[in-house]
Amino acid sequence: MDIFLLPKRNGRYQIYSKAVAEIFNASMSAAGENAKKPTALPEETNDGPPPTAEAPSTARRIWQALKAGYMTLTKDQRRLESTLKSLNESGDIQLHYPAALDSKTALEIYQTLISAQVDKHRKWLIVDGALLPFSVILTLIPGPNVILAYLAWRTLGHYRSHKHAKGSQAKEYFDFYPEAALDDLQELVESRWILKRKEKINLIGERMNIPDLANHY
């Protein structure tokens, strides 16, 4: 599995997989298109014209707006969780890193990024799991227990992501690929005043066959 250490500002890095990004972006686009589809109108019958389709209720519109906002805000984290899952299920890892680094340093950066995800999901697995029993009390209140459903969903999500991160952390077989393009990208993202920054980032992405690289910055 190909993994890129994409540089960020202040010497930080992020893990990127082109294969995961393509699948993730396709699913996001499909979800967006489905959300935009209008409700089908009933067909006209011999009894008269079809009834007018009802507009979405205010509550439904609010829910759709909140859901869309949540999906946008958590896009990067959900993509990273998908990457952890693919890493855990993959065999050897082809690690692409800035050519200015040596392979030992690149591996240390990879392990540091993965360890941070292990710690993060362990912490939130404990927090959400501890809150879960208390949310059961809210079932006494009429209506759906949204908090219970959310905590159960996130507890399961953190459990899976922690498992995938631990598996990614245990990987032993790496092939190392220094990339001069990542050096150029690092210089670009560290610079404060750059004209047409996104266009230049995308040009660097094309050298590594990564489309729309600027979307990650």
Image (tube, rainbow, N blue to C red):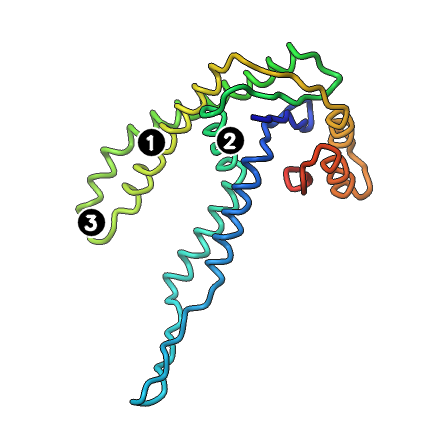
**Quarter of the figure with the C terminus:** top right
Numbered tag placed on residue 100 in the rendering:
none
Q: Amino acid at mark 3?
A: Ile
Residue that label 3 marks: 141
Nearest to the eye among marks 2 and 1: give it.
Answer: 2
Identified at 64% across, 25% down, the residue is: 5
Say above or below: 210 vs 176: below
Q: Earlier in the sequence, mark 2 or mark 1?
A: 2
Amino acid identity at mark 2: Thr
Residue 39: x and y in percent read: 41, 69
User: What mark, if any, has residue 128 been given in the picture?
Assistant: 1
Q: In terms of secondary structure, where does tag 2 sit?
A: helix
Picture disc at residue 83: 2
The reply to whether the C-beta atoms of the residues labelled 1 and 3 are less than 8 Å apart is: no
Where in the figure is residue 63, as x and y percent of width and height? 40, 56
Mark found first going from the N terminus, 1 or 3: 1
Tell me the element at label 1.
helix
- The answer to which of 115 and 142 lies nearer the viewer is 115
- Look at the numbered disc 3 and give the secondary structure of its residue: loop
User: How far separated are the C-alphas under marks 1 and 3?
Assistant: 21 Å
Q: Position of residue 103 (x, y in %)?
A: 66, 12
Instruction: From the viewer's side, name the closer residue of 166 and 1.
Output: 1
Q: Earlier in the sequence, mark 3 or mark 2?
A: 2
Image quarter where the N terminus lies is top right
Q: How many marks?
A: 3
Which residue is located at x 20 percent, y 40 percent?
A: 137
Q: Residue at x 31, y 89 (%)?
A: 46
- Which residue corresponds to the image point at 67% horizontal and 41% vertical from the top-left? 211
Occupied quadrant, residue 101: top right
Q: Amino acid at mark 1?
A: Asp
